[in-house]
Amino acid sequence: MFAWLAVSLLMARPAQAERVQEFILDNGLKVLLLEDHKSPAVTFQVWYRVGSRNEKDGKSGLAHFLEHFLFKGTPTTGPEEYSRIIAKNGGRSNAFTSNDMTVYFATMSREKISIELELEADRMVNALLGETYFEPEKKVIQEERRLRTDDNPAAALGEVVNAVAYTVHPYRRPVVGWMEDLQNLTRQDLVDFYKLYYAPNNAFIVVVGDFSTTEILPKIRAAYGKMPRGAEPPKVKVTEPEQRGERRVALKKEAELPFVTMYYHAPNQASPDSFALDLLSVVLAGGRSSRLHHELVYKKRLANGIDADYGAVSIDPTGFSVSAQLLPGKDAAELEREIDSELERVKKDLITDKELQKAKNQVEAAFVFAQDSIFGQAMKIGYYEVAGGWRQMNGYLDGIRKVTREDIRRVAKTSLDRDRRTVGVLIPTQAKPQ
Amino acid sequence: MKSFLARLIAIFVLTLWALPAQASTVPKRSVLNNGLVLLTSEQRALPMVAIELLIDAGSRHESVDRAGLANLTARLLTYGTARRNALQISETLDFIGASLASGASENVASISMTILKKDLATGLELMAEILTSSTFPPAEIDRQKQAVIAAIKAQEEDPGAVAGRAFAAALFPESPYGRPVEGTAASVKSLRAQSLKDFFSRFYRPNRSIISVVGDVSEREISQALNQALRGWSKGAAGVPPPAPATIGVPQTIRLNKELTQANIMLGHAGVPRRHPDYYAIQVMNYILGGGGFSSRAMDSIRNERGLAYSVYSYFGADQSHGSFQFVMQTKNESAGEAIGLARDEIRKLREQSVSEQELSDAKNYLTGSFPLRFDTNRRVAGFLGQVELFGLGLDFADRYSGLIGKVTREDVLRVAKQFLQPEKLITVIVGDQKKIKVQ
């Protein structure tokens, strides 16, 4: 319930795919297990293949609202009791919704994790979605939207940039939902959505940590195996038409520093170019010695900070974005020109051998560091499984190692195309003194 | 010494039969030749090492006219040594995919590094250079001043940060603990290179520091490497710790106007230092009030029943010399008054009536049960070991923790609620669209 924002920092690098074990129950529920005994905890996650991507116009925020509403109880568990049961057993639990998925999870000790296993099975099919809790929870979600988006200038800019970058595809809608849409949602919308998308054949389980497969698998079969397979949920088949010409959007809002973001359409992890795009983001903004950071933050002193983000893992084609907050007194147009000149350089000239090696080393080190967290590993497995199957994690490092300087230049040329980008600029206004 | 980490490692050895033989150890404490306290926990599962160095060089050591000095000094550490300039430092780190970050809080300066085991020698060499030969080049000072001033401005966009700063200033007036670590734009501008050098030379000393090293390295290996790498880092004067805040702010309501959809609200007053004997009873009490996430009374009343807020929590922060109590929430401007009333009600109720047996046992079970799960990465273990040493909790702290929480009774909870929740002393900060905010 705390994190509907895309958890992009956790998904950048895949886990050790070769150690993942896959099992599929008769009702279609997939189970992905990764034993990792370095700390005494287990993270248990249920992933539903439904997110804001599956919503209709006028019903934005439905997937996320339903995520909140799954905490309101079943015939055997009272409202909010789920969280209390997990907590008093020493566990930490939460849930989040993204474009492509809705995920429920808890991290507990090996001895206690069956409690989470049972509670998730219960609410997969038995959630009451009680009318009494509908209006208060709607208000909570509206407060969440105010907190995370309306009163957060960079997030508010990101929202309008998405709404302009995509004209048809559902990625144009904010996961939390538009305020007016939230106001108009009804409890029946939630009930219908739940019936349509919450079933074992539209979900999968990821377990990572200090458990034994021979112990946990029978428990999973016992708790989930008897659930009936649901009807096949409708598929989303929307293709964003090719963009022909730059789009620009400005947001005026009380803020202190202008902010610029450039969003380029880009292929996802299914494309062989995704490895080079990953490395390109590192060459541009991975560390203080990266091109954009060194030129624009350090040498020219235009930006307070700069980022290049490739959101590789997603169901449909994704984006490559460059974002920067300006230093006080600097001109956003000048910063844009300077970013453009750096992007042109990487499209025109080959990067150096040393830059390529540096980027590869950074990716490999991050790959090792990411395995330090069982939660992070489970997130990666889940993201890949939703996007195109967890096996796409296999060969990730090999793919990275094979990238050449020519590949980087080629993907820069094809993806960093100005005619296929959206530029968003935050224009700060000041509150009137009271 | 048998600790939680020892148990953790015992489980590890029993079950990790599939991996090569592990040579794991319990966390160890030693003091290097130059007085640096070294804490280690050997974790062989991944070829990586997490290092955290805490230095008694926080902003509590700076005077008001030099506000921001500790922070700026810490920021400059990765921008020039006798052997390497700023770019060479970042090239070195980026080329091995390591992270090295430095910063300061009120209490300590810190340097944290995450690095692959194979590059450890490179990392230690760079760290040693920083500690013994940072040069504070004028052009880099100028750059970092500009960056800090930008960060101060950027914080104005974060209503929670604005409220937090106003609260600290009201609670601890005339104390470094009441001032932002970053300083003000004016104070930062006026800082001089010589002040940074003097601050560095006086406070960045091994006998004022703690280093935690967690990962794929043995205590023996790392203490030899550190003794070698840091042989040029020499002891300084120990000095006396700065005093606790001398004055505590009077109860007051501070309203700051911003064009926001929500009122960002903080209520609070002074708390207790970390070593206070009632610290654990207070933690249990606060869990029930607002520390317990979805299980707290505040969450029930303000979020679940009335839908007034998305995030609502309370917190007893505790430092070496002092502490504070904070109750934090955001609600649409129009409901600020109602939410503040409810927060005060919950505080009052806890002082008037004993909590139930169920609430007490749920709180204790969460705190003790989740405790070992909090240290699930090398980075977190390193951070934990540093805190244990900083507050003098003892290496057996993790073992004792269950007992410390376990002995708290309902009577203790009522007693500490009466004593440490002080409605008559509450300072209230409201950042939001004031024309829409109605508060009595």
Image: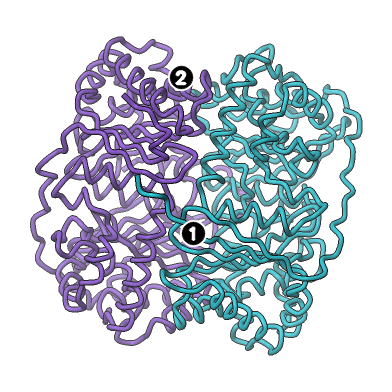
Q: Position of residue B409 (x, y in %)?
A: 30, 16
Position of the C terminus of chain B, as image quadrant, is: top left
Residue assigned mark 2 = B301
Name above or below for residue B339 compared with residue A142: above
Q: Nearer the viewer, residue B5 or A201?
A: A201
| Label 1: element kind | strand
* Circles 2 and 1 on the same chain: no
Q: Image quadrant of residue B141?
A: bottom left
User: Which chain contains the residue that carries disc 1?
Assistant: A
Dot 2: element:
helix
Disc 2 crowd rating (10 Å Cα; few below 14, some 14-19, many 20+) is some
Residue A118, above or below A169: above
User: Are there few (<14), some (14-19), or many (20+) residues within 10 Å of tag 1?
Assistant: some
Q: Which chain is cyan?
A: A
The residue at 66%/25% (across/down) is: A69
Q: Nearer the viewer, mark 2 or mark 1?
A: 1
- Give the residue number, with chain letter if any, for mark 1: A428
Three-letter amino acid code of the residue under disc 2: Ser
CA gap, disc 2 and disc 1: 36 Å
Q: Nearer the viewer, residue B86 or A141?
A: A141
Which residue corresponds to the image point at 72% horizontal and 28% vertical from the top-left?
A185
Q: Amino acid at mark 1?
A: Pro
- Chain represented in purple: B
Colouring method of the image: by chain
Mark 2 near mark 1, Cβ–Cβ under 8 Å? no
For residue B364, side relative to residue B320 (left or right): right
